Amino acid sequence: MTGDHGAFESLVGPEIERLYGLAGLLLNDRARAEDAVQEALLKAWRDLPKLREVAKFHAWLRRLVVNASHDEGRRLGRRRREVELKPSHDRADSDGLDPLLDRDELSQAFRRLKQEERTVVALRYFMDLSTADAAAALGIREVTYRSKLHRAIRTLGAALAADARSTARPEGRWT
Amino acid sequence: MSTDRTGDDFERRLSQSLHAAAPRPSGEVAHRLLSRTAAEHQRRGFSGLRFAPMLAGAAVVAGAVVLGLFFANLLPRNESVGPAPTTSSASALPSSTPAAPSTSATETPAPSVSPSAPAADDVLTCTNPEIGYAASYPADWWANERVEPDFQGGDAVTACTVFAEEPVAIRPNSELPRGVAISIGVSDVVYPPSSGATVVSQEDAIVAGRPAVVREDEQTSSEDPFSYPGQRRYSYFVALPDGRYLVAVTSSQQDQADAVYQEHRRVLDALMDSLDLTGA
């Protein structure tokens, strides 16, 4: 078993940084990113004997991380809704959000996308995956992925344009 | 900032921005992530020898990266977020730890991965000639054949309308039995949530080239005798060319773990992604 786990570590080790980064982008929360990657790695380790085509290991692992991140996101969403029911509660403190993405306008606009939109964008522009690999990570067809990516980029562009307009017209400027 | 989102420059800046924003695991985190798997029981049958060809190229890189992360105390790329908190201290919710397999997130069948299109042995496709659709479902799931009515004038259960992880007995003119994960039918309208249920999420979508509504609702009271408080339903309403709606639904069950519901949700998503309405 030890030797086999060593093989597993050798396969997974080089990918951990990218997978953790992907989960962080999708969840915007380091602790939850770690939870998601941990869940994915545990499942990968447990179910590895069921993987019929070893050449698809990395694609499978990416898909596990995406799915685990979405699961974490749904749990986080439920938690947020619960918190919002308590007006006196400090949401920023309670849900453990990290301002990971407040680096520039692009990343701020990215953060405002829905989780599914963040996923399709991150798979292409952070993981640098081809359309085929990104579609496989989501378990959807390539044509569906292209469509989702197109919509996500359009939404991102609209958010950026809105930001640009609000920046260009400060209150009282035209009076 | 330019909002031109069509050019290479936008794509390059987006890529740079995401790479800069993505968190990096500290060496401690990377080590923890891997070491926890070592304590986890594995299904029988794995041999590292299967991965020998891949390992030949990965071994050197893996050793360098893992040991480098662990011993070099690599700083997070985004310094503004500070040191990475531990899972237990930073998360208010239960963490996914090796000691808690029951909190396992949505299951993903290992063999279903395909880099481009689903492999033939990963999914099966069924057709419903009455409504005019075809849909793909996991190969280890079960979908119904047509069930003829058991009395004159009764309704048949048309094919490809009931999906389950294990075969179930479908009887015409009867309620669906336990064990059914996803059901498909036709409605004249996008019907509202059940009495006593609230909408958790609802969004417009395009499914099989047709307008659709995807909704999740949750039962918040016991007004509906067929539901229980807390029950969730995840539904697609896909507009058919004849003005009706194809309705595909999965629901959580009181005696099932949430992970089962989440798995069924994802299968429903995939099923709708594969939906072909050219016969409708």
Image: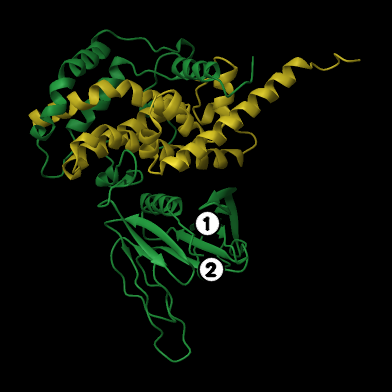
Chain colours: A yellow, B green
Q: Which mark is residue B118?
A: none
Measured as percent of width and height from the top left, residue A83 is found at 56, 38
Mark 1 burial class by Cα count in 10 Å: few <14, some 14-19, many 20+: many
Rendered view: A105 above or below B130 = above
Please report, as a chain letter, where disc 1 is located: B
Question: Marks 1 and 2, how far apart in space?
Answer: 11 Å
Q: How many marks?
A: 2
Measured as percent of width and height from the top left, residue A32 is found at 41, 30
Quadrant where the N terminus of chain A sits is top left
Callout 1 amino acid = Tyr
The residue where tag 2 is placed is: B186
User: Which element is circle 2 on?
Assistant: strand
Q: Is residue A117 left or right of residue B146?
A: right
Q: Residue furthest top?
A: B72
User: Which element is circle 1 on?
Assistant: strand
Measured as percent of width and height from the top left, residue B165 is found at 31, 60
Q: Residue at x 33, y 20 (%)?
A: A17
Q: Residue at x 60, y 62 (%)?
A: B196
Rendered view: A146 above or below B263 = above
Q: Tell which of A115 and A148 is nearer to you.
A: A148
Rendered view: B30 above or below A32 = above
Mark 2 burial class by Cα count in 10 Å: few <14, some 14-19, many 20+: some
Closer to the chain start, of discs 1 and 2, is 2
Callout 2 amino acid = Val
Corner quadrant of residue B65 = top left
Q: Are marks 1 and 2 in contact (CB under 8 Å)?
A: no
Q: Is residue B36 visible?
A: yes
Corner quadrant of residue A114 = top right
Q: Residue at x 60, y 39 (%)?
A: A84
Q: Residue furthest bottom?
A: B152
The residue where tag 1 is placed is: B236
